[in-house]
Amino acid sequence: MPQYKYGFIGAGRMASALAGGLVDAGLAAASEIAASDPNAEVRQAFAERLPGAHLHGDNAAVSRHASMLILAVKPQVMGAVLGNLPLGESAPLVVSIAAGVPIAKLEAGLAEGTHVVRVMPNTPALIGRGASGFSGGTHATADDLASVLQLLEAVGIAFEVPESLLDAVTGLSGSGPAFVYTMIEALSDGGVLAGLPRAVAHQLAAQTVSGAAAMVLETGEHPALLREAVASPGGTTIAGLAALEQGSLRSTVIGAVKAAAERSQQLG
Ligand code: NAD
């Protein structure tokens, strides 16, 4: 049997995005990737996204032969998947992207000594613009963490954090897209209130958020300095910023991240 460089258990949206990122980044050929999923339609969609990849209905056909095994199933089925996951003789690095499944549970369900890394990705990883956090388990080595960083950087940016901070990552980058969608909708509503057609307001709002985020990432400037550069004395922007302060936007957003992080901690 072949040794696959990357094996995916679950071939759904996240798995195909990660696998696509690996191929696009030149980290693997499609023929070095295998994935298993009980759903034939899902397997077909994965094969169409990555012609040449090996698809199986049986998890063991992948788990026995992968150097890095990525568990990309929903948290609710993780227990059942771990209970029936034979690993090869040269045991693979096992990477879980399931939200809220602790390292202790993953390690308890795998053979003693298995190298485990837990990842918290976010939905923009589906289009190659993810922001992820990850933590190594008891037996994970520096090389393991470097390999996972390489995987995640194929679909965005990623930071290693202690597992205790993955709840904070969940509250910020995991839930953050939903907060930003709300902001985009509100900006668009504001544009409509000021007289713009909805379709135009919607596009202007989304591009403004994307452009402002790119300014922060690409210039490396502190957001406060970038904001100051837009707000001329007595001008329009400072009038709007005063209205934002009146509505306590900043403390509301801080509270949203804190509430999501606390909820993640309760669920974990
Ligand atoms: P998905 O539903 O698209 O994919 C999961 C796949 O697992 C499905 O195709 C399903 O058929 C398959 N599956 C079910 N039981 C299985 C079994 N016993 N063995 C093998 N495969 C099985 O879900 P997704 O969005 O790709 O999410 C995958 C994981 O990623 C989840 O744990 C989720 O928490 C995590 N995650 C996803 C996102 C995201 O943006 N989609 C963000 C953060 C975390």
Image: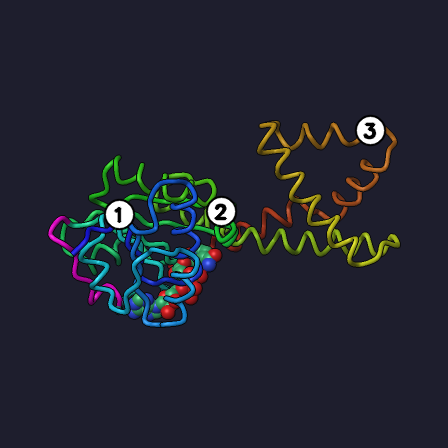
Q: Kindly identify which residue carries mark 1.
A: 5
Task: Point out the image quarter for the C terminus.
Answer: bottom left
Tell me the SS state at disc 2.
strand
Horizontal side, residue 185 vs residue 2: left or right: right
Three-letter amino acid code of the residue under disc 3:
Ser
Q: Kindly identify which residue carries mark 3.
A: 232
Above or below, comparing residue 43 to residue 15 in the picture: below
Q: Quadrant of residue 82?
A: bottom left
* Mark 2 residue's CB less than 8 Å from ligand 1: yes
- Assess disc 3: are there few (<14), some (14-19) or many (≥20) residues with their C-alpha within 10 Å of its C-alpha: few
Q: Does the magenta stretch include residue 87?
A: yes
Q: How far across and how far down the image is residue 13, in percent? A: 44, 60
- Assess disc 2: are there few (<14), some (14-19) or many (≥20) residues with their C-alpha within 10 Å of its C-alpha: many
* Residue range highlighted in magenta: 81-90
Horizontal side, residue 177 vs residue 208: left or right: left
Tell me the SS state at disc 3.
loop
Q: How is the image coloured?
A: rainbow
